[in-house]
Amino acid sequence: MKLPINESNTQFLNCQKFKELGLKGVKLKIKDFETQQIKDKQKVVMSLEVNEKVHKLPLNQTNMKVLEDNFGIETDNMKGKEITLTLIPTRYNGQPTESLLICA
């Protein structure tokens, strides 16, 4: 059974929010996974808990591979595990930017 998440207490985690919240090196607890329509694509979204708030992180292929390498392919086995996130330099449409990378 999936516990209902209070939407007012939930927000998407991006690089800017990561910096604002000072989450570098902070352990985040994996709460749940779901598939969500984001723009025109179906994305796997991971819910993370920190400071009694739930933050949703859409997963890219790199982060899904990190999770699989560390916890296996079953998302049920990942719930309750702790991870940290870090910022890495990347490029998007040829422009330099940053991305969140999972460190398990």
Image: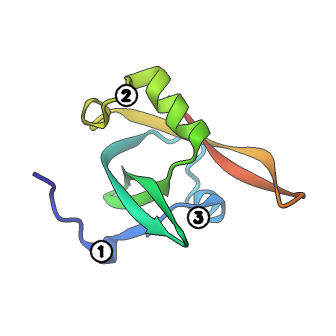
Residue at figure coordinates x 31%, y 36% from the top left: 75
- Residue farthest to the bottom? 8
Q: Is residue 54 left or right of residue 85?
A: left
Residue 103: image x %, image y %? 56, 32
Given contact means CB atoms under 8 Å apart, are the residues at marks 1 and 2 in contact?
no
Amino acid at the residue labelled 1: Glu
Residue at figure coordinates x 46%, y 35% from the top left: 83
How far apart are the two marked residues, 3 and 1, measured between alpha carbons?
17 Å
Q: Residues within 10 Å of mark 2 (few under 14, many from 20)?
A: few
> Under tag 2, what secondary structure?
loop
Foreground: disc 1 or disc 2: 2
What residue did someone put label 2 on? 73
Amino acid at the residue labelled 2: Ile
Disc nearer the start of the sequence (3/1) = 1
What residue did someone put label 3 on? 17
Residue 97: image x %, image y %? 81, 57
> Which quadrant would residue 94 be assigned to in this image?
bottom right
> Under tag 1, what secondary structure?
helix
